[in-house]
């Protein structure tokens, strides 16, 4: 099996590194528009292969999409990244043009591929991928909920002083400040979170989670890449091994949660065909209101783009 990663920056190259360590694909192809970047990154990762006992081949190319032919999965990480003071939405016009070009170049060579979209604003770029590719929308998935959940688990674990691996949670909605963490569905080793922290105190953790990405941008001057890359690999692994894991991902809704024709973060079963099933939770009025508020913001951005 072949996985192609479009964009060899921090996220793309880290994703290739983590995926190579899994040793579950025959070949990883890195493609970037910048000369020599993919070639150099792939050479560096390849020289690690014998150390980690992997047999994965990593090859890098400058803007040569022919090398992506017959990919099982195409990961889109390309586009401009956030700088201090920028929101994810500020990236929309430039990145929408990049996404269209990338998808047009890759879909004709890998018509059966599943697409994992990482570029920001994520839910909007995932929708643009769908409109450009014109394939089954369940083969197009945006990476958001796994990362947002991991960030929430980290902050919550620090607050209540437990291991983050013991925390199970769900975050719905858009990837940004309108995400919807579900207090009712959060547990710690099966124990409801209300036994550890009140809903009011938990709101502080939610706010930290919403702006976790912006905090990293302010520290580093660019977007995060380690946690996002590992989140992508979890999705790739679930698809290639048909593990049918339940993750929150940006997925196409056809009436679920009373929403249609939009990509939004919801819990799904992720398997060999992409989105195998969308899980529709019984949300209360406030949770559903917040989810629809998140969808409204995404639609507002889409209306400003010529699709």
Image (spheres, rainbow, N blue to C red):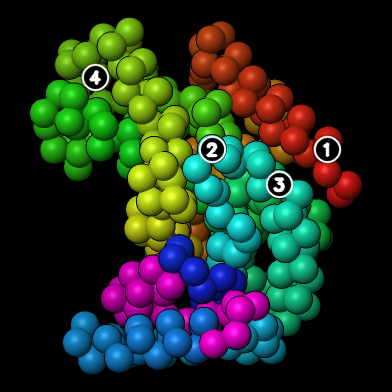
> Residue at left 13%, top 38%?
163
Sequence-earlier tag: 4 or 1: 4
Mark 4 crowdedness (10 Å alpha carbons): few <14, some 14-19, many ≥20: some
Q: CA distance from mark 3 to mark 2?
A: 15 Å
> Residue at left 83%, top 38%?
304
Q: Position of residue 264 (x, y in %)?
A: 62, 37
Does the stretch in magenta take in 15? yes
Foreground of the two, 241 or 168: 168
Q: Position of residue 136 (x, y in %)?
A: 73, 57
Q: Which residue is mark 2?
A: 85
Q: Which residue is mark 3?
A: 92
Q: Nearer the viewer, mark 4 or mark 2?
A: 2
Q: Nearer the viewer, mark 4 or mark 3?
A: 3
Mark 1 crowdedness (10 Å alpha carbons): few <14, some 14-19, many ≥20: few
> Residue at left 76%, top 49%?
93
Q: Which residue is mark 1?
A: 304
Q: Which residue is mark 4?
A: 192
Magenta region, residue range: 13-36
Residue 144, visible in the rendered structure: yes
Kindly check if marks 1 and 2 are in contact, taking CB atoms under 8 A apart as contact.
Answer: no
């Amino acid at each position: 099996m072949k996985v192609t990663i479009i964009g060899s920056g921090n996220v793309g190259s880290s994703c290739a590194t983590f995926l190579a360590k899994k040793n579950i694909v025959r070949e990883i192809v890195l493609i970037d528009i910048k000369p020599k970047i993919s070639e150099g990154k792939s050479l560096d990762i390849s020289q690690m292969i014998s150390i980690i006992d992997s047999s994965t081949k990593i090859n890098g190319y400058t803007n040569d999409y022919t090398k992506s032919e017959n990919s099982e999965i195409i990961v889109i990480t390309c586009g401009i990244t956030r700088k201090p003071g920028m929101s994810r939405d500020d990236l929309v016009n430039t990145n929408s043009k990049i996404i269209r070009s990338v998808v047009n170049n890759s879909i004709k060579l890998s018509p059966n591929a599943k697409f994992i979209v990482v570029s920001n604003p994520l839910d909007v770029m995932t929708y643009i991928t769908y409109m450009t590719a014109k394939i089954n929308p369940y083969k197009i998935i945006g990476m958001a909920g796994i990362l947002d959940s991991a960030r929430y688990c980290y902050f919550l674990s620090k607050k209540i002083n437990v291991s983050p691996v013991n925390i199970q949670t769900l975050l719905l909605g858009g990837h940004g400040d309108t995400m919807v963490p579900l207090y009712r569905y959060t547990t710690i080793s099966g124990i409801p979170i209300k036994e550890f922290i009140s809903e009011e105190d938990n709101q502080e953790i939610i706010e930290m989670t919403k702006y976790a990405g912006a905090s990293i941008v302010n520290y580093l001057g660019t977007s995060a890449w380690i946690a996002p890359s590992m989140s992508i690999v979890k999705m790739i692994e679930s698809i290639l091994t048909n593990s049918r894991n339940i993750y929150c991902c940006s997925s196409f809704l056809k009436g679920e949660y009373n929403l249609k024709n939009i990509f939004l973060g919801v819990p799904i079963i992720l398997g060999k065909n992409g989105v195998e099933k969308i899980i529709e939770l019984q949300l209360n009025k406030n949770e559903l209101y917040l989810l629809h508020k998140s969808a409204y913001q995404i639609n507002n951005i889409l209306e400003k783009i010529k699709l």
